[in-house]
Image (cartoon, rainbow, N blue to C red):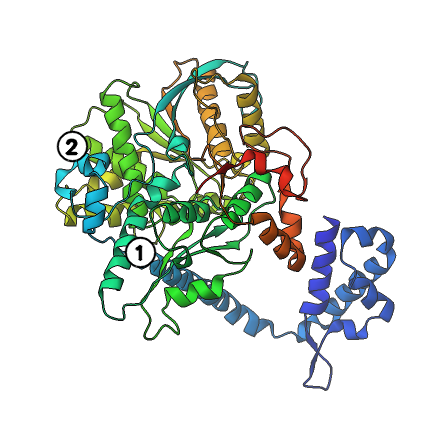
Amino acid sequence: RRGALLKFGFFLSWGSRCQSPGSSKWVSPLKAASPVSIAAMGTLSPQHALGRRPELLAALATAWELLRTRGEMLPWGMILKWGPASALALAGGCIAVMRLVLERFASSVKLLPPTAKQLEEESEDANPLCRAIPALRGKFAWRSLGDFPTPVHRFRCGLGSSLSLEGVREDIADVWVKREDLSSNKYGGNKVRTLQYTIGSFEAYLHNCKAQEGGGAPSLLTLGSGGSNQVLATKVHAAATGVPPEQVEGFAPMPDEPEMDNTLNYLSSLSLPGRQAKWGTGFPRILRVLFQLFQRGKVASWALPPGGNNCAGVLGQAGGALELAEQIERGELPDPDGIVVAMGSTCTTTGLILGVALARALGKPAFRRPGFRIFAQPVHPGFVKLHRLFGALFSESFPMMVGRGLRDAAAAIAAAGGPDVTHEALAVMREELVVSMDLAITGNYGAHSDVSREAKAVYDRSAQPPEGAPGLWLCGHFTGKSFALLLKLLREDGLAKRDKRVLVFWQTKSAVQPLGPQDEWGAFSEECCKNSALKKWGVLGGVSGHLSAAASPAEVATGPEQYRSLMTEVR
């Protein structure tokens, strides 16, 4: 609070301008303040404030007196007349620019038909969308990228007693887990399905470009935060399908918190084939590709949006929901009361909604329980605030929002000869999607909140996976938060003295941390020498969801011996 007060005084002093009597020149009120006061106002940190308090208070008093005595000279009429309009215009301009950029992301990746090679190498019987809707066979380029179907495991787990509700004793409940984390032995998690149609279409795009005379070689750009699963998954699976590594570019320009799981992902990205931009950089290159600037005579490259949230990604996630419907039909688990999933870019949530609508339209005996819900836990506080104020996540026109994603993906299915479930999918979104507004669970983006850390502790001490099944990696970025929501929902059942709901936990974090053939530690050390922010961000130890990580204090990364034992070599 002291630091905020000092900065407010600094704002009043330097940001307020008044006109000297008899002069047309606008000057700062601090010009009249004493040198000691001015020097004191430059010391704004709370640490310095303790030792400079008298001078700082004097500077604040001087600034306030000047504003009080000369404030009538400010052009208040002009400020009141044009200030609100200018602020609204600025906000509107920012929204328009953001929308334009996101529209470019949404249209960058195209759904293309498969090549002859893809049809030969991939069985469309392995594609859950094609199994459910035969009319889609041969319409969309697709790569499996992993091992499917992913299993559903039944865990026994304690519910804790101090997450959100007081006075509830710790109880034990059954938790059904959709093991998306086991979708690939190279790198699993929900991003595998997100990339199935994206990488398949890019591979087809490369083939078409090479077939054209002078077609050139486009790149596939993928971006996220420093600990991005999307960047890592794209580099792993593009290399596995034979996409030339020089045509895959990874970017980590967006900030997240310093936490071990994030550091591991960045190190894994550095170890894999394909270009990797310096940490915290890349927006100019991304914007050039999105708007095709300085690209005359060059074939257009593709840029994946954060989280891979586009029409292709949503179709892949819809396949996951249809696969779960098949498992319910086979009796591998009961028809659930709900699905609990982490919400980052909204791609997985959107795909699950579309898959539920398709399963019902196709007559599958799944997702039919009264009161069925999809419970989504946002991992970014910005999404919570935007949705609370404006219902933004349900927008049917703004790119990367759930409603828009449903419209685009449902239209693609209908255009390819499948059923049009646009109306049904939007109804599921409005009536059966429950977005958690619990900011205590969300915390900061890219790190555990206090609530998710406690949920992980509950899991660590009480979870009982099936015999032979690996445990869950509850990362601070995503699954730790959705697991905290799961425990909260089950505890609410106990508080209400009703039977506990049958909930499926969508495990989106990979069980494998890949280590590629390149010297990731050398690249990381070289970057740290030039970027002190990266050196502070790249921590190891502390809270980690990794199954083999031993509890230790968080510290700055100093060598590969700190982490390589947690990684799996991939080629």
Q: Which residue is drawn at 23% across and 20% down?
A: 330
Between marks 1 and 2 in the image, the one whose residue lies nearer the viewer: 1
Task: Identify the secondary structure beneath mark 2.
Answer: loop
- Asked whether 362 or 76 is in front, the reply is 362
Nearer to me, 499 or 79: 499
Residue 362 — which label? Answer: 2
Residue located 48% across and 62% down the image = 283
Q: Work out whether mark 1 precedes mark 2 in sequence or the reverse, and give the earlier one.
A: 1
Please name the amino acid that badge 1 sits on. Answer: Val
Give the x, y percent position of residue 43. 79, 60
Q: Which residue is drawn at 72% across and 74% down?
A: 28
Residue 411, visible in the rendered structure: no
Q: Can residue 261 be seen in this view?
A: yes
Disc 1: which residue: 109
Q: Position of residue 77 (x, y in %)?
A: 56, 73
Q: In this view, does 149 lie to the left or right of 457?
A: left
Q: Within the image, what quadrant is residue 245 found in? A: bottom left
Q: Is mark 1 on a helix, strand or loop?
A: loop
Q: Residue 508 carries which label?
A: none
> Disc 1 and disc 2: Cα gap in Å?
28 Å
